[in-house]
Amino acid sequence: MHLRLCRICGHVGCCDASPLMHARAHFEETGHPIIEGYDPPEGWGWCYIDQEVVALPDQTPQRGPIPRFV
């Protein structure tokens, strides 16, 4: 599973490969359409409205690794 960051408000949710798809649920609840691959940093974004990859020349910096809880 990978984390996705909302480019509007900073909400972090899990990807569509996860059972609960928190990033998509956040879009459906708020209408915030653009996410970026956040953990691991992947250098791309996604627009839920247009259903396409978007260029992110200003990817959100990370201050360090996100802890993993198993």
Image (cartoon, helix red, strand yellow):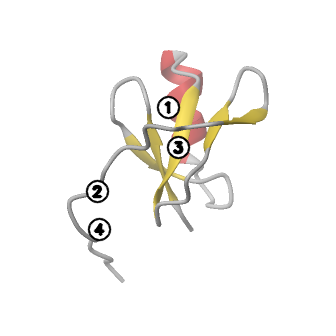
Asked if labels 1 and 4 touch by Cβ distance under 8 angstroms, the answer is: no
For marks 2 and 4, give the one nearer the viewer. 2
N-term mark: 3 or 1: 1
* Structural distance between the alpha carbons of marks 2 and 1: 21 Å
* Structural distance between the alpha carbons of marks 2 and 3: 12 Å
N-term mark: 2 or 3: 3
Instruction: Return the residue at label 2.
Output: 62
Q: Is residue 48 left or right of residue 45?
A: right
Instruction: Return the residue at label 4.
Output: 66
Instruction: Return the residue at label 1.
Output: 26
Q: Residue at x 51, y 20 (%)?
A: 32
How would you rate the neighbour count of disc 1 (Cα within 10 Å): few for under 14, some for 14-19, many for 20 or more? some
Instruction: Return the residue at label 3.
Output: 36
| Along the viewing direction, whichever of 43 and 52 lies nearer the viewer | 43
Q: Is residue 66 left or right of residue 26?
A: left
* Structural distance between the alpha carbons of marks 2 and 4: 9 Å
- 34, above or below 16, in the image: above
> Hey, what amino acid is under mark 2?
Gln
- 3, above or below 60, in the image: below
Q: Residue at x 36, y 44 (%)?
A: 60
> Hey, what amino acid is under mark 3?
Glu
Q: Residue at x 60, y 47 (%)?
A: 44
| Along the viewing direction, whichever of 23 and 8 lies nearer the viewer | 8
> Which secondary structure lies at badge 1?
helix
